[in-house]
Amino acid sequence: MARLAGIKLFKGLDIDLERSEARANWRRFDPEEVLVDFDEPSTDVYFLLSGEVRVLMRTASGKEVILYEMRPGDLFGELAALDGVPRSANVTALTRGEACVMPASVFKELLFSHQSVAERLFCLMASRIRELNARFMEQTVLDLRHRLYSELLRLSTPRQDRSGERVITPPPFHHIVAARIGCRREQITREFTMLTQEGLIERTRGALILRQPDVLKARVAEALQTDH
């Protein structure tokens, strides 16, 4: 069975992936290893078979903004493969893992010869654009506090054993949250302290629990209406 069959772009599709795999490379990586860097001229597409990576952008002054974290089944590098423009982001490994590294020519051949793959890629790119648009609007309209509320809701998933609560596992580092919403770590620490005092969040050993996510949602909705 093709190793790429579990990748979201191909999962469940009846297409021959083994021929494309034979023309790709397989790369193992370690934590903190840079897989792709800014302005790199490479055009390969990476399919994550195992491990996790972080995608970020960096300003000329060195300030970093985190765009995504990616997990097994995800892909990155498709933009450079499609338009040949140097890389616009840095991708660094968070854990050990392995990726299938596919040349742009092989990727485009696979894409253009299977409409179902092309449609999935369009949907994937559309969802990423929508998320970036939402984050751009928040960055433009909301103050730091409400951007934090929105980001915590976005990072969290429903808690299995408690109705209505949400959880972020593992709990995010303050400097990482700061890099996601464009502020300083000290500001995040201060806001987390206030949220804890209000009983809205609780940090346990393995998770950050959103005790009353509906309150956070209501605050974000109100802020969007009043254009803080």
Image (cartoon, rainbow, N blue to C red):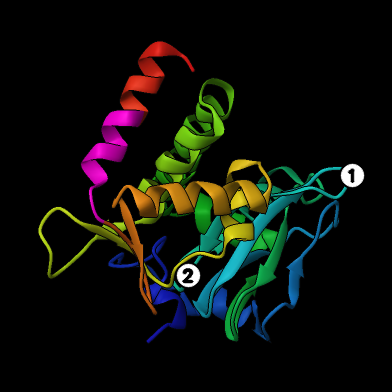
Question: In the drawing, what numbered circle is on residue 71?
Answer: 2
- Residue type beneath disc 1: Ser
Q: Are marks 2 and 1 in contact (CB under 8 Å)?
A: no
As helix, strand or loop, the secondary structure at mark 1 comes to loop
Question: In the drawing, what numbered circle is on residue 73?
Answer: none
CA gap, disc 2 and disc 1: 29 Å
> Is 206 located above or below residue 81 in the figure?
below
Residue 116 can be seen in this image: no
* Left or right, residue 27 beside residue 110: right
> Is 106 located above or below residue 57 in the figure?
below
Query: What residue sits 32% from the left and 21% below the top?
Result: 222
As helix, strand or loop, the secondary structure at mark 2 comes to loop
> Is 172 located above or below residue 226 in the figure?
below
Q: Please tell me whether mark 2 or mark 1 is closer to you in this view.
A: 1
> Which is the main secondary structure of the residues drawn in magenta?
helix
- Residue type beneath disc 2: Arg
- Which picture quadrant has residue 217? top left
Query: What residue sits 50% from the left and 64% below the top?
Result: 172
Query: What residue sits 77% from the left and 51% below the top?
Result: 87
> Is 208 located above or below residue 184 in the figure?
below
Q: Between 132 and 168, which is closer to the camera in this rendering?
A: 168
Kindly identify which residue carries mark 1. Answer: 61
* Left or right, residue 46 beside residue 122: right
Q: Is residue 216 magenta?
A: yes
* Left or right, residue 72 beside residue 163: right
Name the quadrant of the N terminus.
bottom left
Write down the region rendered in magenta. 211-219
Instruction: Give the x, y percent position of residue 11.
Output: 33, 67
Q: Between 156 and 115, which is closer to the camera in this rendering?
A: 156
Q: Between 162 and 51, which is closer to the camera in this rendering?
A: 162
